[in-house]
Image (spheres, grey):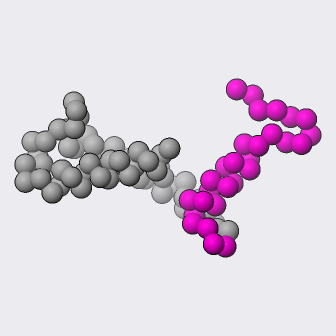
Amino acid sequence: MLTDEIDYLRAKVAELESNERAYTTTIGDRSYQEVADDLKRLSEKYDELIFAVGMKYPGETRHETALRYIRRMEEPKTTGMTKSH
Protein backbone atom coordinates (compact mmCIF):
# COMPACT_ATOMS: atom_id res chain seq x y z
CA MET A 1 0.00 0.00 0.00
CA LEU A 2 1.25 3.45 -0.85
CA THR A 3 0.74 4.74 2.68
CA ASP A 4 2.91 1.92 4.06
CA GLU A 5 5.72 2.83 1.68
CA ILE A 6 5.42 6.51 2.59
CA ASP A 7 5.47 5.69 6.30
CA TYR A 8 8.52 3.46 5.81
CA LEU A 9 10.39 6.16 3.90
CA ARG A 10 9.42 8.84 6.43
CA ALA A 11 10.78 6.67 9.23
CA LYS A 12 14.03 6.11 7.34
CA VAL A 13 14.41 9.84 6.61
CA ALA A 14 13.78 10.67 10.28
CA GLU A 15 16.33 8.04 11.32
CA LEU A 16 18.91 9.48 8.96
CA GLU A 17 18.23 13.06 9.99
CA SER A 18 18.83 12.14 13.63
CA ASN A 19 22.19 10.67 12.68
CA GLU A 20 25.01 13.24 12.68
CA ARG A 21 26.54 11.51 9.68
CA ALA A 22 23.33 11.49 7.63
CA TYR A 23 25.09 12.92 4.61
CA THR A 24 27.22 9.76 4.30
CA THR A 25 24.56 7.23 5.31
CA THR A 26 22.98 4.84 2.85
CA ILE A 27 19.99 2.55 3.04
CA GLY A 28 21.00 -0.63 1.30
CA ASP A 29 22.38 0.57 -2.01
CA ARG A 30 20.40 3.84 -1.91
CA SER A 31 21.63 7.20 -0.69
CA TYR A 32 19.86 9.43 1.79
CA GLN A 33 19.02 11.85 -1.03
CA GLU A 34 17.47 9.10 -3.16
CA VAL A 35 15.26 8.04 -0.25
CA ALA A 36 14.30 11.65 0.49
CA ASP A 37 13.48 12.22 -3.21
CA ASP A 38 11.33 9.07 -3.28
CA LEU A 39 9.51 10.19 -0.16
CA LYS A 40 8.78 13.57 -1.69
CA ARG A 41 7.54 12.00 -4.96
CA LEU A 42 5.31 9.49 -3.16
CA SER A 43 3.96 12.13 -0.79
CA GLU A 44 3.04 14.38 -3.71
CA LYS A 45 1.20 11.52 -5.46
CA TYR A 46 -0.61 10.55 -2.27
CA ASP A 47 -1.58 14.17 -1.55
CA GLU A 48 -2.94 14.56 -5.08
CA LEU A 49 -5.12 11.49 -4.60
CA ILE A 50 -6.34 12.45 -1.13
CA PHE A 51 -7.11 16.07 -1.98
CA ALA A 52 -9.15 14.96 -5.00
CA VAL A 53 -11.77 14.03 -2.38
CA GLY A 54 -14.06 17.06 -2.31
CA MET A 55 -16.27 15.96 0.56
CA LYS A 56 -15.36 13.17 2.92
CA TYR A 57 -17.91 10.91 4.54
CA PRO A 58 -18.82 11.89 8.12
CA GLY A 59 -16.53 10.21 10.61
CA GLU A 60 -13.97 9.25 7.95
CA THR A 61 -10.61 10.65 6.95
CA ARG A 62 -10.01 11.76 3.38
CA HIS A 63 -7.95 8.58 2.97
CA GLU A 64 -10.85 6.38 4.05
CA THR A 65 -13.29 8.19 1.76
CA ALA A 66 -10.90 7.97 -1.21
CA LEU A 67 -10.50 4.25 -0.55
CA ARG A 68 -14.29 3.88 -0.38
CA TYR A 69 -14.67 5.64 -3.74
CA ILE A 70 -12.01 3.50 -5.39
CA ARG A 71 -13.40 0.26 -4.02
CA ARG A 72 -16.93 1.20 -5.08
CA MET A 73 -15.78 1.90 -8.64
CA GLU A 74 -13.79 -1.34 -8.77
CA GLU A 75 -16.73 -3.53 -7.73
CA PRO A 76 -18.37 -5.49 -10.54
CA LYS A 77 -21.67 -3.96 -11.61
CA THR A 78 -24.86 -5.89 -10.92
CA THR A 79 -25.72 -5.74 -14.63
CA GLY A 80 -23.64 -8.85 -15.31
CA MET A 81 -20.35 -7.04 -15.93
CA THR A 82 -17.25 -8.64 -14.46
CA LYS A 83 -13.84 -7.25 -13.81
CA SER A 84 -11.28 -7.90 -16.51
CA HIS A 85 -7.76 -8.72 -15.42
Q: Is residue 20 rendered to the left or right of residue 31? A: left
Number of marks in the rendered image: 0
| Residue depicted at x 9% and y 42% | 24
Bounds of the magenta segment: 58-85
Q: Quadrant of residue 34?
A: top left
Q: Residue at x 7, y 54 (%)?
A: 20
Which residue appears farthest toward the top when viewing the image? Answer: 85
| Residue 74 image position (x, y, % from top left) | 72, 42
Residue 14's spot in the image, x, y percent? 24, 55
Observer-nearest residue: 18 or 36? 18
Tell me, yes or no, whether the highlighted magenta stretch contains residue 64.
yes
Q: Quadrant of the C terminus?
A: top right
Residue 55 in sight here: no
Q: Residue at the location (34% across, 43% down)?
A: 38
User: Does 71 appear in magenta?
Assistant: yes
Q: Which residue is situated farthest in the right direction here? A: 79
Residue in view at x 22 percent, y 44 percent = 33
Report whether residue 49 is seen: yes
Q: Is residue 13 left or right of 76 when viewed as pictured?
A: left
Does residue 81 lie above or below 51 as drawn? above
